[in-house]
Amino acid sequence: MSSPQDYDQQLVAWQEFFDHQKILPDVNHLVADSWRRCRLRLSPFKDTPQKCLSSDILLATQVASFDLVMILFASALEECLLWLGQANESIWASKTLRQLA
């Protein structure tokens, strides 16, 4: 567990980074990398509301993703069946899967 002094030093180092984008020499490189990744998005000094999708938007996104996957799957299956020389099955499978999407 860190001592209060360590915590104070870390807070000073973080504040220096937050205010001036300067990494002090005693900051662990993994911590510094994390600070760089999060710098533009997070501030401990303000509440950041969590963004949530409405149920309608979430459902529409899921449907669109499913449709895209089905179209890609149908195309891949059609190519595989054509490659195997089963053209009739390929046409049937492609039409069936595209109707589902």
Image: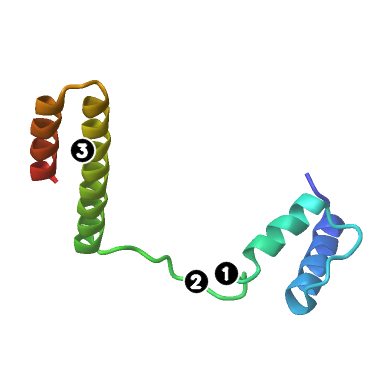
Q: Residue at x 23, y 54 (%)?
A: 64
Residue 98 falls in image quadrant: top left
Q: CA distance from mark 3 to mark 1?
A: 40 Å
Please, what is the three-letter code of the amino acid marked with disc 1?
Arg
Which quadrant does the N terminus fall into? top right
Nearest the camera: 90 or 63? Answer: 90
- Residue 70 in the image: state x and y as whole percent: 21, 42
Identify the disc placed on residue 48: 2
Question: Mark 1–mark 2 contact, CB under 8 Å?
Answer: yes
- Which residue position is annotated with label 3? 74
Instruction: Tell me which label, 3 or 1, sits earlier in the chain.
Output: 1
Residue 73 falls in image quadrant: top left
Image side of residue 94 versus residue 10, left or right = left
Q: CA distance from mark 3 to mark 2?
A: 42 Å
Q: Is residue 81 above or below residue 18?
A: above
Q: Is residue 64 above or below residue 100?
A: below
Q: Residue at x 70, y 62 (%)?
A: 35
Nearest the camera: 81 or 11? Answer: 81
Q: Dot 1 surroundings within 10 Å: few (below 14), some, or many (20 or more)? A: few
Which residue appears farthest toward the right when viewing the image? Answer: 25
Please, what is the three-letter code of the amino acid marked with disc 3?
Ala
- Which residue position is annotated with label 1? 41
Q: Dot 3 surroundings within 10 Å: few (below 14), some, or many (20 or more)? A: many
Q: Residue at x 11, y 26 (%)?
A: 89
Question: Mark 3–mark 2 contact, CB under 8 Å?
Answer: no
Nearest the camera: 84 or 59? Answer: 84
- Residue 92 in the image: state x and y as whole percent: 8, 32
Image side of residue 84 versus residue 18, left or right = left
Please, what is the three-letter code of the amino acid marked with disc 2?
Thr
